[in-house]
Amino acid sequence: MSYELHCYNDNNIELEYVSYISNEPNIILELYRGKLFCYIIKEFIYKATALFGTKIFSIKKSCARTLTNLLSSWMFNLYASKNFNNNKDPFLPNNFNEIVSLKNILIDLIKYDTTILNAHELIDELTIFLIKLFELQLKMLDTYKKSSYYNTNKNNYIIKKSKIIQERTDKSYDFYKFEVKTTFEIKDKRLGNILDNLLIPFDEYNKLKMNYSGKENMDNYIWIILFRYQLLGSNNHQLGVKSDIMSNMNKDYNLNFECFASSINSTFKRYCSIYYDVEKYFGSTGSFYNLTPKRGTFGLNPPYQKDIIETALLKALEYLEEADNNNRDLTFIITIPIWDIEGRKEFTNDLPQQNIDYGDFDIIKKVTDSKYHKLTRKIAKENFTYIDHNFKLLKNKTIQNTYVIMISSKKDINTGKLLEYDFR
């Protein structure tokens, strides 16, 4: 695989990132990936419920929704791993044998049904099944890429978009609905539902258009971005801090880079995201784990997953140490869930049955004890509203209570403004 090192530097920010040379994305190949992944979801749900029943997967949401989210969470962990090779396939991770994060979630869920016996053996059976399932689908994908059918038909599609209006209680919203026209029929029901609901608000579309750096096929790339994130079922993994708050952080602290975002769920022109091969045309620098922030202020709002949060915060502390040693001003403004024991004690709205038990969640103490720690705010979920840019949805009560933490190598940084923000 070929890599490139990129450097960016302006008055407010300095960073480096490593990218890989990728193949040109193709719509027909995306549809085949979608078919394979929908099969993985269906088989995973069937196997999981056959082994464990539905009770442990129905605590907060429907069983199918919970299991789809589990698969999505696991995929985010794979994308964040150093062993993820983007060039093997940008959507289906090659490091599917890294199963620990999924096992840990399953172990925690088991406590909701005391009638389940031999839980660890059953978890092993499910995860071995999933590994073999992924391995088979990737082999099928590789075969498809080399097939005469694909190479004959890979340009046999049309991407169209139409304007629709969604009426809601507060106001109406204008969206573009994207559709793909092919010569073959989409028979998978889940895949068909996804393809029928590829929407993007007018303002988000115009943002992408303004940021676009490619030469042609912009709508094709937008279609792929919409399709992949909806296929993944990322849901709350893609929630962002509201744009008005981000604008305040830009004004007060020169924050203009988001370490975990997507082309759609982002506020600024520069950000990290998981699908670099298509999102690079709209300002993405790729994975946060291929980024080296050197100077400036960076927003850090990672997916709410223990492993990703821990790794991201450890990385941030390393970058601060390096910046400090080189007399550079580097700052991270962090938004993460209040999962540690001490933090959760303060909130009566924190229902134990709705949360995985993370114990002390030691990374919080490591950050707040660091010499770079400047500020911690604890905000109840009803006072912190997140936004889903893609569907123009605001969420607070369904998410977690939130830490807002500032860590910085800048000695005299003013934390006062951050204390004044109203995150509702």
Image: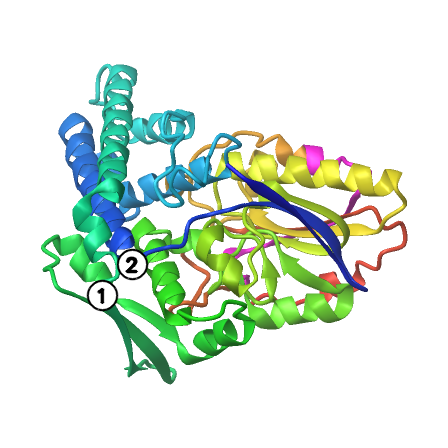
Label 2 with label 1: CB-CB less than 8 Å = yes
For residue 39, side relative to residue 165 (left or right): left
Amino acid tagged 2: Ile
Decide: is 116 above or below 48.
above
Toward the viewer: 308 or 112?
308
Judging by the rendered image, the residue that carries numbered circle 1 is 157
> Quick check: 144 left or right of 389?
left
The residue nearer to you, when weighing 338 against 406, is 406
Segment tinted magenta in the rendering: 366-384
* SS class, disc 2: helix
Question: What residue is shown with label 2?
Answer: 27
Q: Identify the mark nearer the N-term, 2 or 1.
A: 2
Provide residue 30's location: percent of width, then percent of height: 29, 53
Residue 345 in sight in this render: no
Q: Position of residue 308 (x, y in %)?
A: 52, 38
**Viewer-proximal residue, 19 or 128?**
19
* Residue 112 disc label: none
Q: Vertical placement of 407 versus 420: above or below?
A: above
Rendering quarter of residue 10: bottom right
Residue 379 on the magenta span: yes
